[in-house]
Image: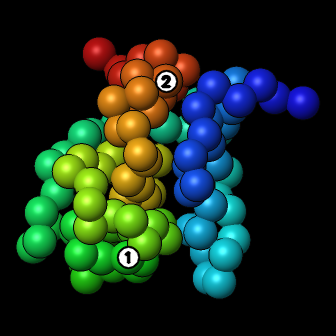
């Protein structure tokens, strides 16, 4: 069993993967192995840039996982998995999750 490095209501970082609860309808979990993450980008969110979106997308390139508390958060993480749609997540502690992802994801190509 994998060790839990970080966990909040919707996001869990284990020793081998990121688990995003509420990603699929109605409550499905997406598991992302760290080795499949090409890049992580932290962005500020506001009323017109994702903060008011509880789940889904207004832009076909990004998919926001379910997070009813997103309206009170200031930062999101966008994950590049090498596919057209990129997960848009808002962990309670974005800095901690970003650190874990950067430590465990493969280094970007030079």
> Tag 1 or tag 2, which sits nearer the N-term?
1
Q: Quadrant of residue 39?
A: top left
- Within-10-Å neighbours for mark 1: few <14, some 14–19, many 20+: some
Which residue position is annotated with label 2?
A: 100
- Where disc 1 sits, the SS reads loop
Q: Nearer the viewer, residue 101 or 55?
A: 55
Residue drawn 11% across the image and 71% down it: 47
- Circles 2 and 1 in contact, beta carbons < 8 Å: no
- Within-10-Å neighbours for mark 2: few <14, some 14–19, many 20+: some
**Where is 64 relative to 1, above or below?**
below
Q: Left or right: 89 with respect to 14?
A: left
**Where is 12 relative to 101, above or below?**
below
Which residue position is annotated with label 1?
A: 54
Residue drawn 63% across the image and 25% down it: 5
Q: Quadrant of the C terminus?
A: top left
Residue drawn 41% across the image and 45% down it: 92
Color style of the picture: rainbow
Residue drawn 15% across the image and 49% down it: 44
Q: Which circle, 2 or 1, is nearer the viewer?
A: 1
- Alpha carbon separation for disc pair 2 and 1: 24 Å
């Amino acid at each position: 069993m994998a060790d839990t490095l970080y966990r909040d209501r919707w996001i869990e970082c284990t020793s081998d993967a990121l688990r995003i609860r509420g990603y699929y309808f109605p409550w499905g979990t997406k598991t992302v192995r760290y080795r499949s993450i090409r890049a992580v980008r932290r962005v500020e969110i506001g009323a017109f840039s994702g903060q008011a979106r509880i789940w889904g997308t207004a832009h076909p390139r990004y998919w926001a996982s379910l997070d009813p508390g997103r309206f009170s958060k200031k930062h999101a993480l966008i994950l590049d998995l090498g596919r057209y749609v990129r997960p848009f997540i808002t962990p309670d502690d974005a800095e901690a999750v970003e650190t874990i992802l950067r430590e465990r994801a493969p280094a970007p190509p030079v």
